[in-house]
Amino acid sequence: MKNFQSKVVVVTGAGSGIGQALAFALGKEGARLAINDRDTQALAETATRLQQNGVSMLSSAFDVSDKDAVFAFADQVFGHFGQVDVVVNNAGLGLGNYPFAEFDLEHFERIMQVNFYGVLYGSRAFVPHLLKQPEAALVNVSSVYGLAGIAEGTAYCASKFAVNGLNQCLIQEFRDSSLRVHSVHPGGINTNITRNAIDYQPKFDLFHKRFLKLSPEYAADVIIRGIRNKKARILIGADAHRLDFVVRLAPVFGTRLVNKILDKTRREVAAGWKE
């Protein structure tokens, strides 16, 4: 998809971070937007800025883990615009690191509900509309944590691996259709994901400062270029490219190496944190 002019683009999690940056960038490209976020105030701020820039748009605040709300949103978008050309399932939720034998199962379930089921519902609700178009794109955001298993990151990794698995299946299923499916794997992007984590603690800010350095605007630019170039896998940041290369080259050794590096960094962050 080379041109977004007058295309109808759905973006979830548009209240901040990558979702918001995508909404602004695509609005400048002339797209008509349908945006979502569970944070009513953040969504309203994004909507106001888009309206000030003359972007045709629709906004709806709800949690993407609510299946009925997602399907109702799909009907609302199609009813309002009469078409859907691009869907970006971006909304996500973070969680800190916990040993597998100790983490809260309710936290695990909540992460899966948002990060995986939110993407699943968004894909299933909008694909029938996307297939009506001569050219369409489904963009599902996974993570670098969907490329390699990370010790004590079980819930987040499991949710992002699930998204990656879903994406790989859909890429194959729709390869001969008008619909292109894109699996997005951001590295360290400076979003609110650690601050909005369901178990947020102030010490998370040290990890955030250490790892999350790339701007959401950069991530949005990479995603848009990936859609234009019909790239099935969109890696964002040098860390994502390095991890992907190492794990694909030597799956067992590469994953062990990544975990050693992360473990060392966690210890350094813990040592630098003062209550």
Image: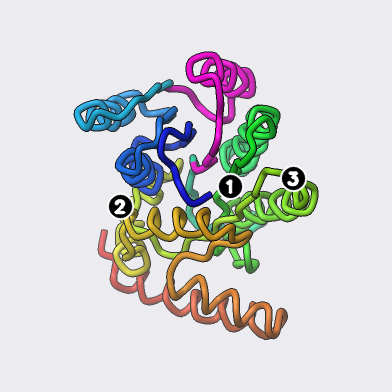
Could you tell me which residue is drawn at 32 percent across and 69 percent down? 210
Alpha carbon distance from label 1 to label 3: 18 Å
Image location (x, y in percent) of residue 205: 30, 57
The stretch of residues the image draws in magenta is 61-90
**Quarter of the image where one finds residue 47:** top left
Relative height, residue 213 to residue 34 (above, below) = below
Alpha carbon distance from label 2 to label 1: 30 Å
Judge left or right: residue 55 versus residue 240.
Answer: left
Give the mark nearest the N terminus, 2 or 1: 1
Residue type at mark 3: give it: Ser
Could you tell me which residue is drawn at 40 percent across and 21 percent down? 58
Could you tell me which residue is drawn at 30 percent across and 52 percent down? 202
Q: Residues within 10 Å of mark 2 (few under 14, many from 20)?
A: few
Q: Secondary structure at mark 1?
A: strand
Residue under label 2, please give it.
202
Image location (x, y in percent) of residue 199: 44, 44
Residue type at mark 2: give it: Pro
Label number found at residue 140: 1
Residue type at mark 1: give it: Asn
**Quarter of the image where one finds residue 185:** bottom right
Label number found at residue 177: 3
Give the mark nearest the N terminus, 3 or 2: 3
Q: Is residue 86 magenta?
A: yes
